[in-house]
Image: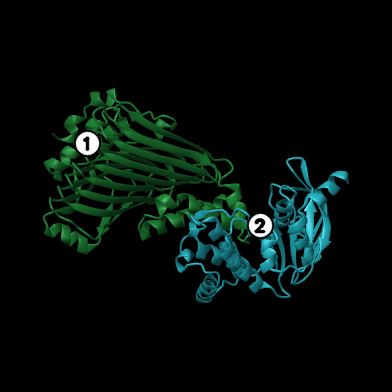
């Protein structure tokens, strides 16, 4: 289970304020979508929850199941259940995809190693589910993967690591429609009362396949509107212009 | 001509301690004398020894008196090529010992020669490895130097000669159970259209001074030189690796990688040298250091020395920590900082580590684990 509550979060990068007091509450089993124009702070919020050292919290709290995680290191947050599917996954060719995922699972299993056979069975099953060819298990981590393959591999890692709170930062960018459907299938397979999710996206398209419980619009480092799935559809028609003008007046 | 006749007192006086661009070292550290012959043993896989013996070749221990003229000539070439290098001259003034691997023409030995060299001497060892590979022959050697005993200094010199159309793949892995000052010099000379693929992992504990080369003396030959060194503690490492192109249409690749922990220092110099007349030569090199420890110091000097117009050449070099974004990505999956750094170190060394045989990989991994655990 995961209950993520963000209170009045203010974040700066190199003295430039990006988030101006974000409030957001994601409860157990809920899927939220965070939408908004470019450069508005969506990725900053995602990275700050994960603990990317580039971002400095100047005010506010991030509570995971009631506990402030802002002082925790990146790996501690991950072991506490937070997962970030990154916009630009890194390539680390010296470790194989399978070994990396297995190491990550072992790191999260409180000193009890995950049995290799069970791991391989799960890996094979999930790779098949996501239409990832077998040989990708032995390739270097994201090594020479295409943009779409990297995104798929992020979802594979999520399915294997089973986080309680997943943040998906533009998981739909650069995907063709078939790949988008596969990625959506992966996210939907995770949905349960033990899995909460924040999907960051520009477009309504992903939300046709993964229907969120709540939609938030972020402009200029603040969440300016909350609603249900219908809000995303409305945005598709009207765009963000109205919200941006509001923010400028604001 | 015997070695002693080549090196008289004048020669020693005329020589000096070698100077290398960007490599600083204490000259006295690698200078030593002894009148005692060092103790050492060797073993190899019998089936390959049998194969080599059956075709008229040999793998044998030598002292100065038991070398034949070809082998002695090879050593003399190294001495001629290093007339200025006092360490090389002094090496051959000491009681001579080492091993000769000799394979005649037209022999292809498929299985690698697994050669363990156990230098377990109380006194410093001056060890020479002599290789003579015949025309149209091929040989793979996996060579492991295990240095033990109380010796504080070890000097290893390679003197190799390949015939035309021959293929040599040699891996030299050096480990020690205590801290030593290791000096390593020498060269492999190619034949026409021959190939030399040399991986070198001098990972004895302590300091290292090294200068090795593959000499592409004849047309069409190919040389590949890979080096891997892990620095830990207060190790001071200066290592120069060169491939020298004398023949036309020769090709070389150099890849040197080093990882620095604790307060270690590593200077790498890689040289792709193309002599006037070596038209059509192609030289590529990479030289990279990863500085993991807070107080390490690494420098790399990639050199291309080119005296011919019609050539292709390129180099790449870097010194730096792991990539912060890579580290963050690994941590974001719950892997600990220590484990993540291990992954980034193995990622960094993989281009020179992956091609190694299992035994070398294991020896290096063990050494690396010890350095990482002390150095993170």
Q: Does dot 2 land on a helix, a strand or a loop?
A: loop
**Secondary structure of the residue carrying numbered label 1:** loop
Q: Is residue A161 visible?
A: no
Q: Is residue B42 left or right of residue A54?
A: left
Q: Name the mark nearer the viewer: 1 or 2.
A: 2
Residue B149 drawn at (x, y percent): 37, 51
Subunit bearing disc 1: B
The label number, if any, that marks residue A165 in the structure image? none
Which residue position is annotated with label 2?
A: A170
Query: Of A171 and B264, which appears nearest the observer?
Result: A171
Report the front residue among A213 and B45: A213
Do marks 1 and 2 share a subunit? no
Q: CA distance from mark 1 to mark 2?
A: 57 Å
Q: Check the rendered structure and report the hue given to chain B.
A: green
From the image, state the color of chain A: cyan
Q: In the visual, does A127 lie left or right of A158?
A: left
Q: Residues within 10 Å of mark 1 (few under 14, many from 20)?
A: some
- At horizontal 19% and vertical 39% (from top left) the residue drawn is B74
Q: Nearer the viewer, residue B256 or B286?
A: B286
Q: Residue B268, percent across and down?
A: 43, 37
Image label count: 2
Q: Nearer the viewer, residue A25 or B37?
A: A25
Way the structure is coloured: by chain
Which residue in the structure is indicated by mark 1? B217
Quadrant housing residue A25: bottom right
Which x, y percent locates residue A43?
A: 70, 52
């Amino acid at each position: 289970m995961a209950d993520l509550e963000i209170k009045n979060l203010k974040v700066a990068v190199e003295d430039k304020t990006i988030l101006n007091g974000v409030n957001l509450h994601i409860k157990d089993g809920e899927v939220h979508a965070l939408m908004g124009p470019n450069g508005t702070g969506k990725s900053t919020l995602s990275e700050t929850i994960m603990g990317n050292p580039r971002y400095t919290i100047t005010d506010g709290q991030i509570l995971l199941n009631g506990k402030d995680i802002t002082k925790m290191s990146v790996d501690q947050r991950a072991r506490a259940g937070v997962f970030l599917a990154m916009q630009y996954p890194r390539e680390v060719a010296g470790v194989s995809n399978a070994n990396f995922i297995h190491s990550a699972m072992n790191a999260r299993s409180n000193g009890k190693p995950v049995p290799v056979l069970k791991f391989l069975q799960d890996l094979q099953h999930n790779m098949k589910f996501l239409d990832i060819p077998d040989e990708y298990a032995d390739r270097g981590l994201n090594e020479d993967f295409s943009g779409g393959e990297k995104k798929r591999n992020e979802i594979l890692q999520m399915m294997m690591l089973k986080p309680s709170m997943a943040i998906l930062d533009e998981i739909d960018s650069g995907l063709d429609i078939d790949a988008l459907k596969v990625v959506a299938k992966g996210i939907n397979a995770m949905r349960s009362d033990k899995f909460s999710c924040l999907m960051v996206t520009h477009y309504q398209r992903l939300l046709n396949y993964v229907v969120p419980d709540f939609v938030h619009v972020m402009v200029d480092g603040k969440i300016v509107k909350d609603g249900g799935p219908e809000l995303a559809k409305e945005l598709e028609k009207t765009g963000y212009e109205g919200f941006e003008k509001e923010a400028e007046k604001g | 001509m015997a070695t002693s006749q080549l090196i008289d007192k004048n020669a020693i006086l005329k020589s000096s301690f070698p100077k290398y661009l960007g490599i600083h070292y204490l000259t006295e550290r690698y200078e030593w004398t002894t009148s005692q012959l060092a103790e050492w043993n060797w073993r190899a896989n019998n089936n390959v020894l049998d194969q080599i013996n059956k075709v008229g070749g040999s793998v044998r221990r030598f002292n100065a008196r038991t070398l034949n003229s070809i082998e002695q000539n090879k050593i003399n070439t190294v001495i001629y090529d290093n007339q200025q290098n006092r360490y090389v001259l002094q090496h051959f003034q000491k009681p001579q010992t080492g091993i000769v691997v000799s394979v005649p023409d037209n022999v292809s030995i498929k299985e690698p020669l697994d050669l363990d060299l156990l230098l377990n001497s109380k006194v410093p060892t001056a060890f020479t490895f002599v290789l003579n590979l015949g025309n149209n022959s091929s040989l793979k050697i996996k060579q492991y130097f295990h240095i033990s005993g109380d010796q504080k200094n070890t000097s290893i010199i390679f003197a190799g000669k390949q015939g035309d159309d021959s293929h040599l793949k040699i891996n030299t892995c050096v480990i020690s159970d205590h801290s030593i000052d290791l000096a390593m010099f020498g060269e492999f000379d190619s034949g026409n259209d021959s190939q030399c693929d040399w991986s070198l992992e001098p990972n004895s504990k302590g300091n290292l001074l090294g200068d090795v080369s593959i000499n592409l003396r004849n047309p069409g030959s190919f040389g590949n030189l890979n080096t891997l060194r892990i620095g830990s503690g207060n190790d001071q490492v200066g290592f120069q690796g060169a491939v020298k192109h004398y023949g036309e249409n020769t090709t070389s690749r150099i890849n040197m990688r080093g990882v620095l922990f604790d307060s270690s220092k590593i200077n790498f110099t890689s040289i792709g040298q193309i002599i006037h007349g070596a038209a059509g030569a192609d030289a590529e090199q990479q030289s990279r250091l990863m500085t993991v420890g807070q107080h390490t110091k690494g420098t790399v000097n990639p050199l291309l020395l080119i005296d011919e117009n019609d050539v292709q050449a390129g180099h790449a070099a870097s010194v730096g920590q792991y990539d912060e974004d890579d580290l963050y990505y690994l941590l974001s999956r719950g892997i600990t900082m220590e484990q993540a750094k291990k992954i980034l170190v193995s990622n960094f060394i993989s281009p020179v580590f992956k091609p190694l045989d299992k035994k070398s990989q294991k020896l290096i991994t063990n050494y690396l684990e010890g350095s990482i655990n002390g150095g993170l």
